[in-house]
């Protein structure tokens, strides 16, 4: 039989243990405490080129192999809204992708701006019309990027902040498409390839400048992650001209999981 002192000591220990156990039970896990995640943007965020498209997403071609879907599988946010859509421009984000943002949204990702700058038509010109026409088209795109795109990006970022004031927003850019010089025997010239990569640099520069205006935003640069995996390498994470044609010049499943996902994860 225990003495009164030992019984008091045991009772105190049990009470302390109960408090600790209750506190642990009440404390949410890291995953459960994660708020909602909303994935915005264009085809580089929807996952065009990676396959495994969600049938209900239709022409938006959202993929279960896209970096937003992979990230939410690994981190189990309290909610996941996959809004990114193939072909989206800044105007499309403003008019059709922000409705699920709210004060409970804790994480947002976005790639946007490439379609505003005429990415698809520029690539079509470069593939079909030769070096001179390609360089001219890229120069036109760069002029738009450097003179008009900033204001369009700022409008999107401001709207996101207003709709989801507590969210951390990760803005990702676009990779260089080509290794220059690379091991491609055919296709567009190295001059055209260099010009296209230069446009990606301009896009990144303007995007980073706009992102820097917002304290709860992070600029996530994927260009280094794709280094050695561009078109014209032995281990490319980007489609060249392919079928279906809309997958051309987009990340493969490996580009989403090996390029975009780790860069987003490092900033999320």
Image (spheres, rainbow, N blue to C red):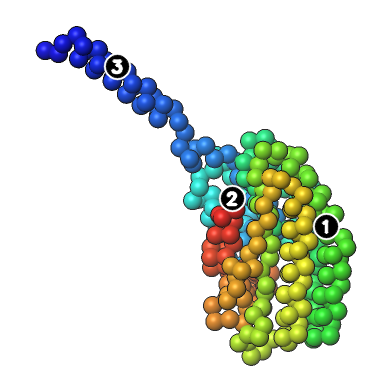
Secondary structure state at the residue bearing disc 2:
loop
Secondary structure state at the residue bearing disc 3:
helix
The N terminus sits in image quarter? top left
Residue 48 left/right relative to 64: right
Q: Which mark is residue 12?
A: 3
Disc 1 packing (10 Å; few <14; some 14–19; many ≥20) = many
Q: CA distance from mark 3 to mark 1?
A: 64 Å
Q: Looking at the image, can residue 61 be seen?
A: no
On screen, residue 260 above or below 182:
above
Secondary structure state at the residue bearing disc 1:
helix
Residue 190 left/right relative to 9: right
Residue in view at x 73 percent, y 64 percent: 204
Residue 92's spot in the image, x, y percent? 78, 53
According to the image, label 1 marks what residue?
A: 150
Q: Nearer the viewer, residue 84 or 31?
A: 31
Residue in view at x 32 percent, y 18 percent: 15
Residue 124's spot in the image, x, y percent? 77, 76
Residue 10 left/right relative to 79: left
């Amino acid at each position: 039989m225990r003495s009164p002192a030992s019984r008091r000591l045991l009772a105190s220990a049990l009470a302390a243990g109960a408090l600790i156990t209750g506190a642990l039970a009440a404390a949410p896990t890291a995953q459960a405490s994660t708020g909602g995640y909303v994935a915005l943007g264009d085809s580089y965020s929807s996952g065009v080129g990676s396959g495994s498209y969600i049938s209900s997403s239709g022409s938006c071609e959202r993929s279960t192999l896209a970096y937003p879907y992979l990230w939410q599988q690994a981190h189990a946010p309290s909610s996941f809204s996959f809004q990114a859509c193939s072909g989206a421009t800044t105007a499309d984000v403003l008019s059709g992708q922000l409705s699920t943002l709210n004060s409970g949204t804790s994480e947002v990702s976005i790639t946007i701006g490439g379609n505003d700058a005429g990415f698809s038509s520029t690539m079509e010109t470069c593939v079909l019309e030769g070096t001179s026409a390609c360089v001219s088209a890229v120069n036109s795109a760069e002029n738009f990027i450097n003179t008009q795109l900033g204001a369009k990006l700022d409008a999107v970022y401001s709207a996101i902040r207003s709709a989801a004031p507590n969210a951390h927003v990760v803005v990702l850019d676009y990779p260089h498409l080509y290794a220059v010089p690379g091991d491609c025997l055919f296709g567009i010239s190295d001059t055209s390839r260099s010009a296209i990569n230069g446009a990606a640099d301009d896009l990144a520069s303007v995007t980073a400048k706009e992102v820097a205006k917002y304290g709860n935003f992070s600029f996530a640069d994927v260009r280094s992650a794709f280094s050695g995996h561009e078109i014209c390498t032995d281990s490319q994470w980007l489609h060249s001209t392919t079928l279906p044609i809309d997958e051309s010049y987009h990340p493969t499943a490996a580009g989403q999981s090996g390029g975009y996902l780790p860069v987003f994860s490092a900033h999320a």
